[in-house]
Image (spheres, coloured by chain):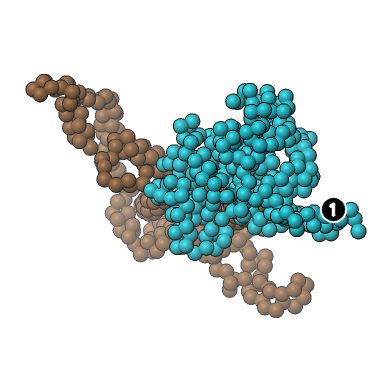
Chain colours: A cyan, B brown
């Protein structure tokens, strides 16, 4: 038998003692052509943990996030969500690329919120939230509608259910986008700079919704430039630069007392 | 509308104390006297032409009146409309399939779509129609079975496909190639973030296309498709190449040849073509309204005055769509 089998058997034994982490990245690398954007990233996100990814633009934060739900494919290394590999099936000592249909099934459990909202403009807020449950999971329209109303109320937009995205403010659109992701009952939520496209005065309302979500025990990975949010809500702060994890730790400590020069230089600019 | 706005404009300013003279706020609109002059001149020219045409022997208006509602002519108009609708419906469906095939990640589908486009867009529709007319000469029977073996069933081609259906097939396949490009332009116009969001929600490629991308592409697809419909209406006059002779143009030509009156029957044909085009344009207007959801007017938020700005925007959209349709006419 090969080394890898023993290695995975060892991992299985470890998993029996501690619960499987929600996200486990082991030596993940990603290249676009000759440009290596992620270099040997290893990190772990536990259930219920809120992890904030910070760093300068072009540091690979967003790419890493997109690898987690297989919008991008990792070039090497292993990336698993809730114990199952993303985008691959493991047969013996080989990784088989998944059929897109199976990859789509994996993504159902992972919610994603984008910087540019990406709401469906031809549907009302309510229809946006109902769309995935009815089309992907086959939930009945009446059930999906009731749940969508519930979710819109949760993000404070009960009265805007029948508005089209074009008639909502940026902050309201992003809250609808969060409700839309929650409608699939995800076990993990990914936020890709959710407040970067917003007017400063609208940032708060979106962060408040995300705080509530974190309190409810949702596992969240948040790429952000909002250091205040990171300090208040995150359990772990990861600082990335040049495709590498430079520093990881408790947000309060990393922000107050960064160990690496690069972290210090970055934080002195944003804080 | 102008009464209402001027009424609003002359209302005294609330700042003025009781008894104070109202501040003059009446708006004087910019006048365009030359527009009126040009319009009057044009009307005069048209009037001269109409009066002259009414008296001219060659137009032979009594014959026009006699044949415009002739049963043979109205029946031919029906055939023209039927040809247009059938070949457009098939052309649009095939066009959507071809465009989606060209955008698909599957190289086999891509190549098939490309070859189809190459052939049907690369040869004149008239030539294609002549070919379809010769189908029964080239393939005398249509067989079902294993190649090079005795067929299970065999039909003579002429029994399966009459000239009407050959004309429909010829027009539809040619149209599908053009529609494919129109649809593809529409698909490309949709922000890639949309399909990304759909993918992240767990939708497959097909669902994403059907529910998210195509509905948004429709806004871009409809205006040039309206053009294609009107163009198709006129292209039906070529099906005489098949030969299918019951449509409007060939039918009126046949009648005019029998009664030696070419001009009045051309006018009859033109009247019918214009009438059908007008009806189709109304249909396009409603389709455009349907697919403008999310970009057009704000949903009704309850009682309250409609603001002038919104009205102006709506009027602008209406004017633009009318202009687009006139552009379509020119083809």
**Residue designated by label 1:** A7
Is residue B27 shown to the viewer in this render?
yes
Residue B15 pos. (x, y %): 18, 23
Residue A187 pos. (x, y %): 61, 53
Which residue sits at x=65%, y=50%?
Answer: A47
Q: Residues within 10 Å of mark 1 (few under 14, many from 20)?
A: few
- In the picture, residue B35 is in which quadrant? top left
Residue A238 pos. (x, y %): 68, 36
Viewer-proximal residue among B2 and B15:
B15
Is residue A31 shown to the viewer in this render?
no
Q: Which chain hosts label 1? A: A
Q: Is A229 left, or right, of A83 in this rendering?
A: left
Residue A246 pos. (x, y %): 73, 32
Helix, strand or loop at label 1? It is helix
Which residue sits at x=83%, y=57%?
Answer: A9
Which residue sits at x=60%, y=40%?
Answer: A234
């Amino acid at each position: 038998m090969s080394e890898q089998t023993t290695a995975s058997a060892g991992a299985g034994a470890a998993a029996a003692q501690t619960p499987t982490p929600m996200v486990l990245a082991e030596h993940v690398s990603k290249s676009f052509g000759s440009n290596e954007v992620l270099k040997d990233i290893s990190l772990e996100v536990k259930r219920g943990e809120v992890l904030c990814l910070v760093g300068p633009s072009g540091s690979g934060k967003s790419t890493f996030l997109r690898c987690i739900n297989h919008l991008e494919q990792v070039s090497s290394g292993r990336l698993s969500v809730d114990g199952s590999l993303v985008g691959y099936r493991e047969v013996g000592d080989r990784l088989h690329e998944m059929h897109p249909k199976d990859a789509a099934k994996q993504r159902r459990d992972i919610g994603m919120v984008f910087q540019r909202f990406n709401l469906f403009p031809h549907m009302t807020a309510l229809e946006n939230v109902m769309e995935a449950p009815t089309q992907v999971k086959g939930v009945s329209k009446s059930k999906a509608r009731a749940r969508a109303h519930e979710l819109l109320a949760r993000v404070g937009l009960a009265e805007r259910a029948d508005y089209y995205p074009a008639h909502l403010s940026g902050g309201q659109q992003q809250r609808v986008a969060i409700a839309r992701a929650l409608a699939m009952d995800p076990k993990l939520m990914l936020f890709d700079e959710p407040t970067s496209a917003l007017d400063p005065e609208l940032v708060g309302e979106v962060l408040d919704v995300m705080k509530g979500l974190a309190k409810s025990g949702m596992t969240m990975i948040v790429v952000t430039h909002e250091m205040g949010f990171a300090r208040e809500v995150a359990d772990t702060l990861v600082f990335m630069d040049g495709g590498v994890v430079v520093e990881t730790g408790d947000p309060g400590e990393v922000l107050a007392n960064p160990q690496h020069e690069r972290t210090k230089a970055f934080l002195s600019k944003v804080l | 509308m102008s009464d209402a706005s001027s009424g609003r404009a002359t209302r005294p300013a609330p700042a003025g104390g009781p008894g104070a003279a109202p501040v003059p706020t009446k708006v004087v609109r910019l006048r365009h006297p030359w527009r009126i002059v040009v319009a009057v001149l044009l009307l005069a020219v048209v009037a001269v032409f109409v009066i002259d045409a009414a008296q001219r022997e060659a137009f032979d208006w009594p014959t026009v009146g006699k044949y415009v509602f002739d049963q043979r002519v109205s029946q031919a108009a029906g055939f023209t409309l039927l040809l247009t609708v059938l070949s457009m419906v098939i052309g649009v469906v095939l066009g959507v399939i071809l465009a989606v095939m060209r955008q698909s990640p599957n190289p086999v589908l891509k190549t098939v779509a490309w070859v189809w486009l190459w052939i049907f867009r690369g040869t004149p529709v008239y030539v294609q129609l002549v070919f379809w007319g010769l189908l029964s000469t080239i393939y005398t029977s249509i067989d079902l079975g294993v190649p090079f073996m005795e067929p299970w069933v065999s039909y003579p081609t002429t029994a399966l496909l009459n000239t009407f259906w050959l004309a429909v097939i010829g027009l539809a396949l040619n149209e599908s190639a053009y529609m494919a490009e129109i649809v593809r332009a529409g698909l490309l116009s949709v922000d890639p973030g949309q399909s990304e969001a759909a993918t992240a929600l767990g939708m497959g490629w097909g669902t994403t296309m059907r529910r998210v991308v195509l509905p948004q592409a429709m806004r871009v697809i409809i205006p040039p498709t309206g053009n294609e419909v009107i163009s198709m209406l006129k292209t039906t006059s070529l099906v005489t190449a098949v030969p299918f002779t019951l449509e409007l143009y060939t039918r009126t030509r046949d009648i005019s040849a029998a009664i030696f009156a070419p001009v009045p029957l051309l006018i009859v044909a033109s009247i019918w073509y214009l009438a059908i085009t007008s009806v189709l344009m109304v249909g396009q207007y409603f389709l455009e309204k349907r697919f403008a959801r999310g970009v057009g007017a704000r949903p009704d938020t309850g009682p309250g005055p409609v603001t002038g700005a919104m009205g102006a925007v709506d009027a602008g959209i209406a004017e633009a769509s009318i202009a687009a349709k006139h552009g379509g006419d020119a083809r």
